[in-house]
Every structure is written in structure tokens, then in C-alpha cells.
Image: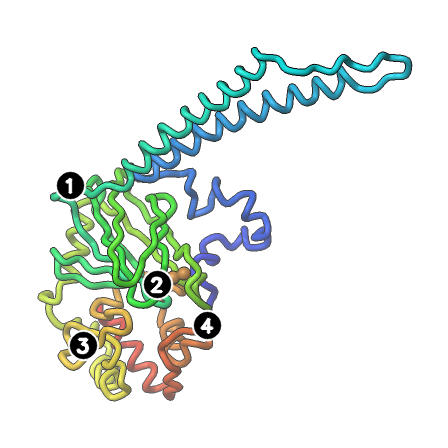
Amino acid sequence: MSEPVYFAAVPRLKWSLWLLPALACRGPFPQSTLDPRSDFSAAIDGLFTNIFWWALFVFVVVESLLVYAIIRYRARPGAPEPKPLHGHTALEIGWTLAPALILVFIAVPTIRTIFATAGHAPPSALRVEVIGHQWWWEFRYPSLGITTANELHLPVHTPIQLDLSSADIIHSFWVPRLGGKRDLTPGHVTRIAFRSDSAGEYLGQCAEFCGVSHANMRLRVFVQPEAEFQAWVAGQQPASGPAAAGGDARVPEGRQEFVRNGCIACHTIAELPQARGVLGPNLSRVGSRTTIAGGLFANTADNLRRWIHNAPAVKPGALMPPSLLPDSELDALVAYLQSLK
Ligand code: CUA
């Protein structure tokens, strides 16, 4: 199995992974809260910067006074004891008022940001239902009739509302450059509303420990220009007809294998009437995705083959049981899935 795509994207940084805690927020790192690309994340970044400068101010003042006192009043041979100070009304009022004021300067923008990022999007917003599963993401676009997995496509310059819930246990949606994070809780809908004015590909990650493959529950968000987004929407419609065979003679055989091997019990494929399972990701247009297995591996024939052969061997805890199919049947299945574009 080739390497997880996250690492494949930054191979030269692999050796320095231990530096991540110190460096993770800037530079070439794909998940940086300090490189905001939406109104939501810009609000959080602005708040962070504001509080950072206040903290730096307090640090400099306190440490300067401390260093001054240490040097000025240090013990010296023959020097008299410094005069003890007991009660100083002006000082006491000063060091009570100053922190209170600083707290106000921090609290007001903080509360303002909490409310600003907790609201609903306007009615014109594109609404997407996000459902957390162990260990992948389901995305449903009720107004567009699309269900997909792990890769969220959104139009740029458009208000977005994500309605978050979970199929099993608590997960947390976090795409640092777009905002968040917010919990997905079974039986309860939480929301994130934002708007991105910057097209691009943004990486995200489940941010609430949810079991053995929590770290392998990744997602990608493609914020696209309107025309590109509409092209994606058109390509995802079941109405666009059965997937083209693409000239691969093994596609019909793969379609049969998909039914015969019980894949239909857990997966939906729009063009295949028998395939209406909902436990696993909807595979109607799986060939159009860039990754598989919760964003863990690039969507290549080789990775698909290994994934179908023995999913838990390459992603701990993966719920899809090993198929252990012979190569010829695996190849047919892979050809079929890749034809679903
Ligand atoms: Cu889902 Cu951690």
C-alpha cells in the first residue's frame, strides 16, 4: 500500500514530524489555523492575534518588573535590608484595575466572535448535511440530490451551512483554514456557517477521539469557482446515466462481482438498483474522488485493490471485512469502481 496521501503531500517534512507542535501553524503545513480562508476562520484568527498581543504586553510588563526587582533589590555585602512595604493604596488600585480592563478588552471581542460564528447562514446558503461515521465522512446535498464521502465540494463566494450529526459516536469536524471545530453528536444537529472567498483545496481532520482510526478520519474540501462547482454537480447527478464503461471490458464483470460479493449490503450505487446499502460510503461516483478510505489513500487502482482485499490490514479497525478475493475478481471490481465517474 502506498503511503497515506497526507504524508505523500509533504514527503520532505516527514523526518521532522516531531517538530510539528512547534511549527504546525505556519508555512507549508496544509492544516493551519493561522492561514484563514473563510469569514469564520478569519474571525477566529483575528481574535487569536488580538489576544496574543495582549498576552505579550502582560508578559513584557510583568517580566520587566520582575527582572528590575531582582537586580535592584538583590542582596549585596554591607547593603542595608530594603525597606518592607506594607499597604500602598495607589498600587493596589492600579494592579486591580489594569487586569480588569485587559480582561474586558479580551472578553468583548471573544464574546462577539462566539456569537458571530454560532449563527445560521442566510436562507440562500447552500446547505450540506455532514454525518460522521467510524471512520469517514458522509456529505449530503439535499437541494442537489447528491450524496458523497470524504470530499466536500463547495462554491466560492457563497454562504454555506453545514448541518452536523453523527451515525455512531461523537466526532468533530475541523478544517482549520475554513473554521470550526464543531462536534458531531448522535441525535443532535450542530451547525457551522461560513463563506470562503478563496478557491482551493483544504484539508481537514476529525478532532475528537473516536476510536482506533480516529487519526485516519480525514477530509478534503474543494472550494471551487461557480462554473467548476456546477460541472462537479452535473457529474454527480444520478440522472447523468449509468457510468460509462470507459472501454474496460472488465466493468460488466466487476458490476456482477459487486452484487455477488455482498458489497451491495453496505454501499449505494445509483446506477445499480440492487446497491442501496447505507452503512458504508455512497459509491455512485467514487471514481471521481481523489482519495479513498476516509481520505487516507490516493484513489489509484493499486490502492483500491489492496483496500478491497483487506481493508482492516491497511486502516486499523476499518469496518469493511476483508474480501480476500482472487486477483482476477479484484481487478474486475476495481475496474468497475474506477468507471464510476
Ligand atoms: Cu471521528 Cu475522531
Q: In front here: 133 or 219?
A: 133
The residues tagged by marks 3 and 1 sit, at their Cα atoms, a distance apart of 33 Å
Q: Amino acid at mark 1?
A: Pro
Q: Position of residue 315 (x, y in %)?
A: 44, 71
Label 1 vs label 4, nearer the camera: 1
Disc 3 designates what residue?
276
Disc 1 designates what residue?
122
Q: Is 1 above or below relative to 160?
A: below
Q: Position of residue 164 (x, y in %)?
A: 26, 55
Disc 4 designates what residue?
316
The quarter of the displayed image where residue 72 is located: top right
Marks 4 and 3 close (CB-CB < 8 Å) = no
Applied colour scheme: rainbow
Give the secondary structure at mark 3. loop
Q: Earlier in the sequence, mark 1 or mark 2?
A: 1
Disc 2 designates what residue?
291
Q: Earlier in the sequence, mark 1 or mark 4?
A: 1
The residues tagged by marks 1 and 2 sit, at their Cα atoms, a distance apart of 32 Å
Marks 3 and 1 close (CB-CB < 8 Å) = no
Q: Position of residue 10 (x, y in %)?
A: 48, 52
Q: Earlier in the sequence, mark 2 or mark 4?
A: 2
| Image quarter hosting the C terminus | bottom left
Q: How many residues crowd mark 1 within 10 Å: few (<14), some (14–19), many (20+)? A: few
Give the secondary structure at mark 4. loop
